[in-house]
């Protein structure tokens, strides 16, 4: 202990930061160590509370109750140390009654009954607030005291208008915003997003689900990473969005459509999406993830080039993640070898470092094997900076023939081939050798 205390404070802080796990139940050992010495406690306490992390229902209820008791009643001063909040949406009245009363008293919460069609009265900027029945969000109560907040993950249920409850005074230091919502509810409209962005000049990372529209705004000029999950944007909206992100380095887009053919005009083709990305981010974009497998119902193309387009114009792109089905679509080409020749040899930028390919159906794995075999022959000359290829099989029974030969051939070119099967461990047979794929 003496030798530990002799270390510089900065070294101790870095050590605690390294040892402090995200899972609250795993922090007990570090917390107990800090209890043995006031000096250690003073250094480690802020780090122990950097992350408020109860993102799902698997955590014991008593741990969650103890967490809110500590943060909202017994030690509210600890909120100043919180940097990241990932909390499952939870109502105040879900806690034990005596704790509920203590929290209400501290925050000056007054309950009353609103008309049946009212769900929540937004909190004002002070501690005195009004509360509609039993709809008080515990994560939002906690957030109100976190003046140093840098990352906020909101899990929104279908009743709460959470965005309207965020006190803007906590947002100036916000760097990362993750928003998950119910697609059936129009809870995340553009004015609220713009309000948050105006109050968050440091916001650089935005992840949002269910986005279907966007209005021009200069509030996203500092955005470096943008992830759209289960979203469906018209190509003109995509262009507007990308125009407002001049320094964007990472873009991920999972297209989600719910009708068989909801997009009827040619300008909605994925090739135009790639063209728009290239037009507005070619000098800054380093990472691109396109998951368009839900798009292809009813669409057919003569060649893959008509479907996806060309990534070569993305001069700064280093990391690409894409579904093989996204690259191919429902092409009418009969010869698999012709499809392969139209794929990666023309579509990847020369300075690409890593490629992740998702195979989501059996026909993809056959084409994938041919494509990888072709890549082994051209990667050294056409993609000299390529380091890693990751293949993810996302369907049951995923198999890829000739695994050992492919790994060996890529290895001769200095490229690592990693195979992963997400649903379960799968044994892969390649002639006289069987390989077990790593489960992600």
Image: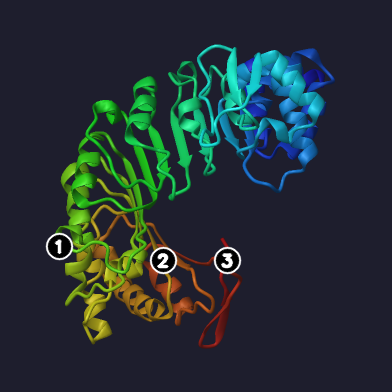
The residue closer to the viewer here, 358 or 260, is 260
Picture coordinates of residue 411, whole percent (x, y) = 42, 67
The residue closer to the viewer here, 216 or 408, is 216
What separation in Å lies between label 2 and label 3 (alpha carbons)?
Answer: 15 Å
Q: Point out the tag, 2 or 3, that comes first from the N-terminus.
A: 2
Vertical relation: 407 (above or below) 255: below
Per the rendering, the mark at residue 438 is: 3
Picture coordinates of residue 286, whole percent (x, y) = 31, 45
Vertical relation: 321 (above or below) 11: below
Q: Quadrant of residue 95?
A: top right
Read off the residue under disc 1. 266
Model colouring: rainbow
Observer-side mark, 2 or 3, equals 2
Q: Point out the tag, 2 or 1, that comes first from the N-terminus.
A: 1
Quick check: can you spot residue 40? no
Observer-side mark, 1 or 3, equals 1
Quarter holding the N terminus is: top right
Q: Quadrant of residue 175?
A: top left
Q: Residue at point 67% right, 18% down?
A: 78
Q: Secondary structure at mark 1?
A: helix
Picture coordinates of residue 370, whole percent (x, y) = 33, 79
Q: Point out the tag, 1 or 3, that comes first from the N-terminus.
A: 1
Dot 3: within a 10 Å radius of its alpha carbon, few (fewer than 14), some, or many (20 or more) residues? some
Picture coordinates of residue 318, whole percent (x, y) = 31, 50
Per the rendering, the mark at residue 358 is: 2
Q: Is residue 21 left or right of residue 398?
A: right
- Of all residues shown, which one is farthest toward the right? 36
The residue closer to the viewer here, 412 or 214, is 214
Q: Is residue 409 left or right of residue 397?
A: left
What separation in Å lies between label 2 and label 1 (alpha carbons)?
Answer: 25 Å
Q: Residue at point 29% right, 54% down?
A: 352
């Amino acid at each position: 202990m003496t030798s530990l205390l002799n270390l510089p404070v900065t070294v101790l802080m870095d050590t605690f930061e390294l040892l402090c796990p995200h899972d609250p139940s795993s922090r007990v050992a570090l917390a107990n160590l800090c209890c043995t010495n006031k000096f250690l406690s003073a250094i480690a306490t802020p780090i122990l509370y950097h992350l408020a992390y109860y993102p799902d229902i698997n955590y014991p209820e008593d741990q969650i109750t103890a967490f809110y008791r500590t943060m909202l009643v017994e030690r509210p001063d600890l909120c100043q140390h919180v940097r990241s909040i990932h909390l499952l949406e939870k109502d105040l009245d879900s806690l034990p009654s005596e704790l509920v009363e203590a929290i209400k008293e501290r925050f000056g919460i007054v309950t009353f009954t609103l008309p049946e069609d009212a769900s929540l009265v937004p909190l004002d900027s002070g501690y005195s607030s009004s509360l509609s029945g039993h709809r008080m969000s515990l994560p939002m109560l906690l957030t109100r005291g976190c003046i140093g907040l840098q990352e906020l993950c909101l899990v929104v249920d279908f009743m709460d208008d959470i965005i309207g409850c965020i006190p803007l005074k906590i947002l100036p230091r916000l760097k990362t915003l993750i928003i998950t919502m119910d697609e059936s509810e129009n809870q995340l409209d553009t004015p609220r997003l713009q309000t948050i962005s105006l109050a968050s000049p440091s916001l650089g990372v935005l992840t949002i689900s269910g986005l279907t529209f966007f209005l021009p705004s200069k509030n996203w000029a500092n955005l470096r990473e943008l992830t759209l999950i289960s979203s469906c944007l018209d190509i003109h909206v995509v262009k507007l969005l990308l125009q407002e992100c001049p320094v964007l380095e990472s873009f991920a887009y999972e297209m989600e459509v719910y009708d068989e053919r909801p997009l009827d005009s040619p300008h909605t083709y994925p090739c135009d999406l790639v063209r728009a990305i290239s037009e507005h981010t070619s000098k800054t974009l380093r990472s691109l993830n396109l998951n368009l497998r839900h798009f292809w119902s009813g669409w057919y193309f003569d060649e893959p080039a008509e479907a996806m387009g060309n990534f070569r114009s993305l001069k700064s792109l280093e990391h690409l993640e894409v579904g093989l089905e996204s690259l191919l679509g429902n092409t009418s080409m009969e010869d698999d070898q012709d499809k392969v020749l139209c794929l990666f040899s023309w579509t990847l930028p020369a300075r690409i470092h890593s490629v992740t390919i998702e195979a989501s159906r059996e026909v993809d794995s056959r084409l994938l094997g041919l494509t990888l075999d072709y890549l082994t022959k051209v990667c050294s000359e056409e993609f000299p900076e390529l380091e890693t290829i990751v293949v993810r099989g996302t369907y049951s029974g995923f198999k890829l023939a000739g695994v050992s030969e492919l790994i060996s051939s890529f290895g001769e070119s200095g490229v690592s081939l990693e195979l992963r099967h997400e649903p379960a461990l799968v044994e892969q047979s390649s002639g006289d050798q069987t390989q077990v794929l790593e489960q992600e």
